[in-house]
Every structure is written in structure tokens, then in C-alpha cells.
Image (cartoon, rainbow, N blue to C red):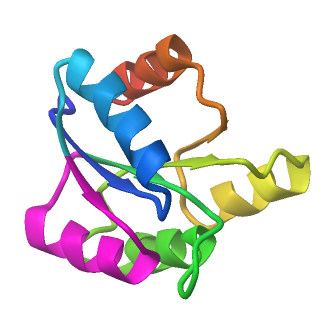
């Protein structure tokens, strides 16, 4: 299934803006959420084709939100790419174990992220 709609879950307005501009330039429809809990609710509501998930957020963090989405019948089919400042290999392994399909670190390399999204579609 080609990816058309992307949900960005990130507590940073700057990161949401940067990722939104990158995705809009790539021809994707974009929506966003400012927290893990809001992101889970938005994912159930709008059923995006892909989720870009930050990790370090107040409340429900990105690992917890990814796990919740991966275990929920309504959202488990939606691929999640974790997009974070956490660069340790153990973080990447843990993120993938929570159900993420891929893991990219910030600052995001735009062409690399767009290629990863295209590869999922």
C-alpha cells in the first residue's frame, strides 16, 4: 500500500515543522501530535499510512507509544519510524523491539528519510 498520509508525533514545534516541510515537499499529507498520548488517539482517529515517532516526550514516551500502537488491533498495521536524538545502538534495538519498522536519528537526513518512507510503501 503506497504511503500518502503521515502522522508526526513530536513534542518539539521546531521538529514538527522541519519534518512537515520535508514530507509536504515529498508529496505527503501530514498531520501531527504533540505527545505520545495525543499521537495514539490521533492514529486511531485518522488511520495514517505511517507514523514518525519521537522518543523523548513528557508523559507517554515514544517507545511506550510505539508499543501501544503495535499491540492495538486498530493501529498495529501502521508502520512506525522512530525519529529521535537517542543515538545509542541499545536505543535502536529497543525501539525496533517495541514494534517500530525503522529508526532514524536527528538531525534527520531528508533524502534518507524520504527513501526509507518510499521503501515501506
Q: Could you say where residue 14 lies in the image, as x and y percent from the top left?
A: 46, 45
The tally of labels here is: 0
99 or 27, nearer to the observer: 27
The front one of 22 and 13 is: 13
Image location (x, y in percent) of residue 51 = 36, 51
Residue 48 in magenta stretch: yes
Magenta range is: 31-49
- Residue at figure coordinates x 55%, y 16% from the top left: 112
Q: Is residue 40 left or right of residue 66?
A: left
- Res 2 visible: yes
Q: Quadrant of the C terminus?
A: top left
Q: Residue at x 54, y 62 (%)?
A: 99
Outermost residue to the bottom: 59
Residue 56 in the image, given as x and y percentages of width and height: 65, 67
Q: Residue furthest top?
A: 111
Q: Is 38 above or below relative to 78?
A: below
- Left or right? Give the position of 32 relative to 17: left
From where the camera sits, is residue 74 visible? no
Residue 89 pos. (x, y %) = 88, 47
Q: Residue sitting at 42 percent across and 74 percent down? A: 35
The residue shown at (48%, 75%) is: 65
Instruction: Say left or right for 8 vs 53.
Output: left
Which is more toward the observer, 1 or 28? 28
Q: Which of the 4 quarters of the picture holds residue 107?
A: top right
Queried whether the magenta region covers residue 29, the answer comes back as no
| Above or below, comparing residue 34 to residue 84 in the picture | below
Q: Considering only vertical position in the picture, is 65 above or below 52?
A: below
The N terminus lies in quadrant: top left
Residue 20, by quadrant, is top left
Amino acid at each position: 500500500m503506497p504511503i500518502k498520509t503521515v502522522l508526526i508525533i513530536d513534542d518539539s514545534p521546531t521538529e514538527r515543522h522541519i519534518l512537515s516541510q520535508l514530507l509536504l515537499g515529498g508529496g505527503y499529507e501530514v498531520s501531527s501530535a504533540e505527545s505520545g498520548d495525543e499521537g495514539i488517539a490521533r492514529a486511531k482517529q485518522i488511520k495514517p499510512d505511517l507514523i514518525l515517532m519521537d522518543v523523548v516526550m513528557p508523559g507517554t514516551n515514544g517507545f511506550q507509544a510505539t508499543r501501544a500502537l503495535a499491540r492495538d488491533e486498530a493501529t498495529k498495521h501502521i508502520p512506525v519510524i522512530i525519529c529521535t536524538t537517542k543515538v545509542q545502538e541499545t536505543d535502536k534495538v529497543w525501539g525496533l523491539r517495541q514494534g517500530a519498522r525503522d529508526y532514524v536519528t536527528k538531525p534527520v537526513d531528508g533524502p534518507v528519510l524520504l527513501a526509507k518512507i518510499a521503501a515501506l510503501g
